[in-house]
Image (cartoon, rainbow, N blue to C red):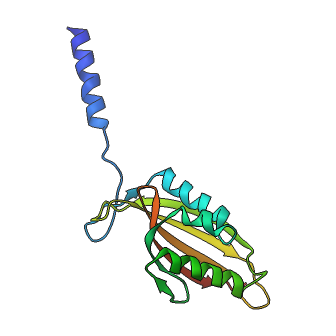
Amino acid sequence: MKKVLSIFTILIFLVGCESAPKSNGYPSKFVTLGTQASVDLVVELDKYWGVDYDKMRTFFVDTVKSSFEAGETFETLDGFIGQVKKGMNDNPGDQNWSMEGAFSIDANGEKDGEWVNAWFLVDASATQPKREIVEYYFVKNGKIHEFQQSRRVIID
């Protein structure tokens, strides 16, 4: 009888200690951490950014929607790649970026997929101030479907 009571007590304790997954969101959206695979995809893309445009293409769907920090928007991969090339050509020698971090969230919304937030520090140059670039990538089925970018000037 003591054994049965002990086992029963342990089971009640284990069931009682079970916690719900942590999430939050507004309004009524539940947001949880996404997967490492989505973060790894963005980290891998960063290795080829502005260096190998053909390899960059493999990370995106052809209908990628993109919005850059200066307001340029595109709804095709060709438009996106063209803007990246333009940015690289317009700012030669001004590409000292360092990825400072990235994380993924799963918004569990109407779209299946995850948002990866990545941020970069960019050194000042003759034509640009020191700045932080924040980017969001919507990843679904191992491909980037949406890209958004913003910038914040850093004043030391």
Instruction: Determine the residue positioned at 24% across, 28% down.
Output: 12
Residue at the limit of the structure toward the left, as seen here: 1
Question: Can residue 24 be seen here?
Answer: yes
Task: Locate residue 133, reporting x and y percent.
Answer: 60, 77
Figure label count = 0
Q: Residue 153 sits in which quadrant?
A: bottom right
Q: Residue 139 sits in which quadrant?
A: bottom left
**Residue 17 against residue 4 in the figure, above or below:** below
Question: Can residue 130 be seen here?
Answer: no
Task: Locate residue 78, reporting x and y percent.
Answer: 52, 77
- Judging depth in this view, the residue of 67 and 128 nearest the camera is 67
Q: Is residue 107 left or right of residue 80?
A: left
Instruction: Determine the residue positioned at 56% across, 75% down.
Output: 134
- Judging depth in this view, the residue of 41 and 77 nearest the camera is 77
Instruction: Determine the residue positioned at 22% across, 15% down.
Output: 5
Quarter of the image with the C terminus is bottom right
**Residue 132 against residue 101 in the figure, above or below:** below
Instruction: Determine the residue positioned at 43% across, 79% down.
Output: 75
- Judging depth in this view, the residue of 98 and 59 nearest the camera is 59
Task: Locate residue 21, reporting x and y percent.
Answer: 33, 48
**Residue 115 against residue 67 in the figure, above or below:** above
Q: Is residue 141 left or right of residue 27?
A: right
Quarter of the image with the N terminus is top left
Q: Residue 90 sits in which quadrant?
A: bottom right
Residue at the limit of the structure toward the bottom, as seen here: 127
Task: Locate residue 64, reporting x and y percent.
Answer: 44, 72
Q: Is residue 40 left or right of residue 74?
A: right
